Amino acid sequence: MINPDVRPFLEGTDLAHVATIGPDGAPRTSPVWIGTHGDHVVFLTGNRGRKYRNLHTDPRIALSLAPADNDYMPVILRGRVVGWVEDESRWEIIDELATRYTGAPYPREVDEYGDRAIALIDLDYQHIGVG
């Protein structure tokens, strides 16, 4: 369940950073669009990249974001990827994220290989603020 105090941060336009565990055990981070879908945190990625492969090997994930208007109020999340949306229904979530972040639906020509995927995350840790 997403904490009601955390949800507004996830439904804003601040980029999140996700951390995954690489094949050598080292952490890897990258910025992502983030949102919610029901009780899941979601983010968009490609199914050919390292994030996707890392999370299929080890579904543990950490996410952080710092609101642009208060970067000393970080949101720190940890959990597991419990599923992927890779069929045509992914476009509803992708377009919602793209419209929020860019003001327009996601351009389909960017996905010419059909490799866009949405990660579904269940949270086990949620914290707002320093400390």
Image: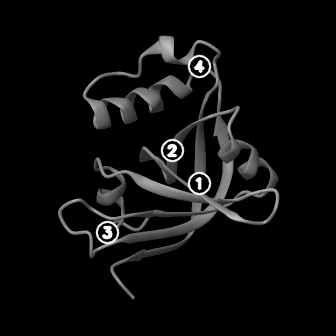
Which residue is the site of mark 3?
5
- Distance, label 1 to label 2, CA atoms, is 9 Å
Q: Depth check: 26 or 81 in front?
A: 26
Q: Which residue is mark 1?
A: 121
Do the numbered discs 3 and 1 sit on residues whose CB atoms are within 8 Å? no
Residues at discs 1 and 2 in contact (Cβ within 8 Å): yes
Q: Amino acid at mark 2?
A: Phe
Distance from Cα at disc 4 to Cα at disc 3: 31 Å
Q: Vertically, is 53 above or below 96?
A: below
Q: Describe the element under mark 4 as helix, strand or loop.
A: loop
Sequence order check, earlier mark of 3 and 1 = 3
Viewer-proximal residue, 117 or 2?
Answer: 117
- Determine the CA span between mark 4 and mark 1: 19 Å
Q: Residue 98: x and y, percent?
A: 37, 31
C-alpha separation, residue under disc 2 versus residue under disc 3 = 19 Å
User: In the current view of this chain or complex, which residue is farthest to the left?
Assistant: 69
Image quarter of residue 67: bottom left
Which is closer to the viewer, label 2 or label 3? Answer: 2
Q: Are the residues flagged by discs 4 and 2 in contact, CB closer than 8 Å?
A: no
Label 4, on which residue? 88
Q: Residue at x 46, y 30 (%)?
A: 94
Quarter residue 22 falls in: bottom right
Query: In the shown orientation, is residue 56 left or right of residue 64?
Result: right
Q: Say which quadrant the C terminus sits in.
A: bottom left
Residue at the farthest bottom position = 131
**How far is mark 4 from mark 2, CA to CA?**
16 Å
Identify the residue position indicated by label 2 in the image: 43
Q: Secondary structure at mark 1?
A: strand
Q: Is residue 66 above or below residue 111?
A: below
Q: Amino acid at mark 1?
A: Ile
